Image: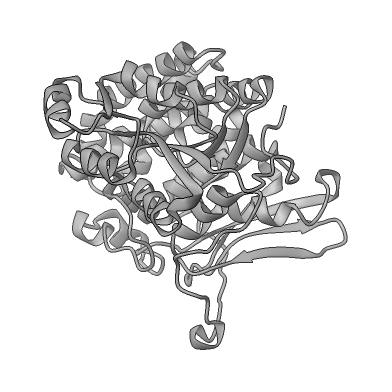
Amino acid sequence: MNAVPLRNDKAVNGHVRQVTVLGATGSIGASTMDLIRATPEKYQVAALTANTDVEGLAKLAREFGARFAAVADPSRLGELRAALDGSGIESGAGESAIIEAAQRASDWVMAAISGAAGLRPALAAVDRGATIALANKECLVCAGDFFMSRAAKAQACILPADSEHNALFQALGSGNRDELTRVIITASGGPFRTWSAADIENATLEQALKHPNWSMGQKITIDSASMMNKGLEVIEASYLFALSPDEIDVLVHPQSIVHGMVEFADRSVVAQLGAPDMRTPIAHCLGWPDRISGRAAALDLAKIGQLTFEAPDYERFPGLRLAYDALRAGKGATTVYNAANEVAVAAFISGKIRFGGIARLVEGTLNAAARDGSAQGPATVEDALSIDHNARNIAATLLPQIALKAS
């Protein structure tokens, strides 16, 4: 069932790789395009997509000679066509056009559309047996068993593009699955690593967005501050590598140099290290099974001086504990976890709840979904999206109560 490759069985052999980038104008997409730009002779861009950034999409499509460009907002089709006028590049808009981009022939697909909106396009690429660099957590958090089963059936190759999962992927190559004892995902600890619970409760949006190591989008930066992002990564690792919750540990590592470790039965621990730059794991996926020249800074351990590690604090960061609870509950609980967190983060950004209310809203939604039976395991895309929709409704209903408690 595991569609994550363990060996280099799809060699490129000098072939010009046809690539599609779903979410080309986001931070992951920008890093991907930067790597392609460095060695244009190795890649041909088949299709690019964006959510609403028509100008950025058209600019990239022209620069890389894409054959197709699509914007998710259907109202922006006329604008996109105007921006591509005279280029010969085909265009489309709306969800069907994004799915078409994923379905078009290419060897390699970067799946970097954030949120549940990325599920259908990623599955469209899966169903044609493509090699997919997966940077969308929701594909696995919302429909992990279903997604990986479908990938295995289509013989699609899933390459983890997140830094932590890519680190595990690289380290896992040092042994066999039955020799594995556990994997260790590292966490920076975010901006509130040393803060008291009371201070975390009342943290402001500006404070939550000051990540010490990574430059990321607003949502993922807030998730890092709450450690919900690490919870999502624990769930993702479980589905990607067919691991039980007890085989996944989290270790706080403020320097963000060691991205993941694998411990084997002989107690050897293999780690992957690198500067905190998303271009490193993306380069690994883009070149796989070969290695390509990276664009990140070289790692200078002597200059860094020391690497430190701490156990995670599940009391100050309950979002991480809730992820393990959801994973052990199984069924659709991980889908509920993700949906409730998205509602909670949006509420925090808009000033409706305090920072500490994010975890309380997620926990309340998980409990409510368990009571009403709406967290059944998804067997189809429609099931996953239905659970997601119901969880968002529950979270929205609970929101005033959470806001009241925080006041």
Q: Is residue 123 above or below residue 45?
A: above
Quadrant where the image shows the C terminus: top left
| Residue depicted at 70% across the width and 36% down the height | 242
- Quadrant housing residue 138: top left
Q: Position of residue 78 (x, y in %)?
A: 12, 23
Q: Is residue 102 above or below residue 302?
A: above
Is 397 placed left or right of 139 in the picture? left
Q: Is residue 391 visible?
A: no
Q: Position of residue 381 (x, y in %)?
A: 48, 15
- Quadrant housing residue 284: bottom right
Q: Nearer the viewer, residue 387 or 51?
A: 51
Q: Is residue 243 visible?
A: yes
Q: How is the image coloured?
A: one colour
| Residue depicted at 67% across the width and 38% down the height | 4
Q: Count the marks: how many?
A: 0
Q: Position of residue 326 (x, y in %)?
A: 54, 33
| Residue depicted at 55% across the width and 34% down the height | 107
| Residue depicted at 45% across the width and 57% down the height | 39
Quadrant where the image shows the N terminus: top right
Is 204 placed left or right of 302 in the picture? left
Q: Position of residue 180 (x, y in %)?
A: 80, 50
Q: Is residue 120 above or below residue 62?
A: above
Q: Nearer the viewer, residue 406 or 205?
A: 205
